[in-house]
Image (cartoon, rainbow, N blue to C red):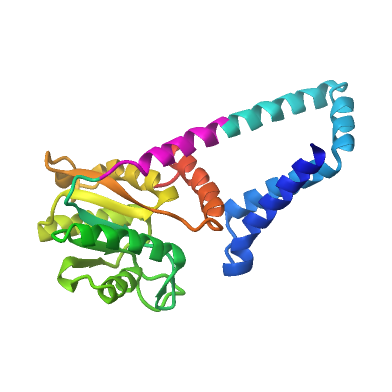
Amino acid sequence: MNILVALVGIMLTLWFLAPFFTKRILNIGNATGIIVGVILIIAGLCHNIFQNLIMEGLQIPIVHNIIIIAAYAIGVICITAFIISMCIYTATKKRPVDPATVIVLGCKVYGTKASLMLEERLYAALDYLEANVTSHVIVAGGRGYDEEISEAECMNNWLVDHGINPMRIHMESKSTTTYENLIFSFEIIMEQKLNPNIAITSNDFHLYRALKLVNKCKSTNTVRPLIESDRFSYGAISAPTAWWLFPTYFVRELYAVLALWLGLKK
């Protein structure tokens, strides 16, 4: 059993390290995964030492209380992570009313080339646009400090190269956050009188937070008439994430959703 725990720790550590070694991606998601993996490795290899320390610590009142609090904290963390995970999974199943106006949320651009996750979103949008030939698409995302073109322009070029008529594409290139992606895209829908049935397109792990932000957009006067309209509806187009990237971004999203619930960020 101890060896099994250590092996699980090694696998987790390597899985969360993969994005760093391949793409130099290091964020709170894979940092958390690496820390948990290392703890499991140490716990598996040094099980007897850990067990003895805990048993001795339980005999000291203050240490006993700390261990009990830590155990409860771990339980709360696991339950919270499970609840958020279920919310994320459920969001991927919320289908839009067809045909819908597609909003593709921005993601990293390397120079002028779409990142892997942005391409995953674009392929999901492409499948929908080919199946719904009257639908328009809004590509949403500004230009980062290390990007040669805006995310919107990159997505526009990609879709045109893959056969989508440029007349069906609308660029929103001012936004820097998911919240701004939505606000500015809704403004385009109102200005261009596009279909108010919305299909928000993003990676699977990101869709719950994106859909939750739709309601927060009501606080913006410019788009409130659209969101409160009887004709307005929204759903999700889920783009699957590469297996070796998913854990890193999924764990990072757990933190982001928790921050959203606590009102710490949009």
> For the point 77% across and 45% down, which residue is it?
6
> For the point 52% across and 44% down, which residue is it?
255
> For the point 85% across and 31% down, which residue is it?
51
On screen, residue 130 above or below 219: below
Asked if residue 134 lies in the magenta stretch, the reply is: no
On screen, residue 88 above or below 135: above
Q: Position of residue 248 (x, y in %)?
A: 56, 53
Report which quarter residue 42 is drawn in: top right
User: For the view shown, which residue lies furthest in the left direction?
Assistant: 193
Q: Looking at the picture, tell me which residue is in the foreground, 265 or 190.
A: 190
Q: Which residues are magenta?
A: 79-95
Number of numbered callouts drawn: 0
Determine whether, in the image, residue 37 is placed left or right of residue 181: right
On screen, residue 46 above or below 130: above
Report which quarter residue 59 is drawn in: top right
Q: Looking at the picture, tell me which residue is in the foreground, 23 or 189.
A: 23
Q: Position of residue 157 (x, y in %)?
A: 29, 75
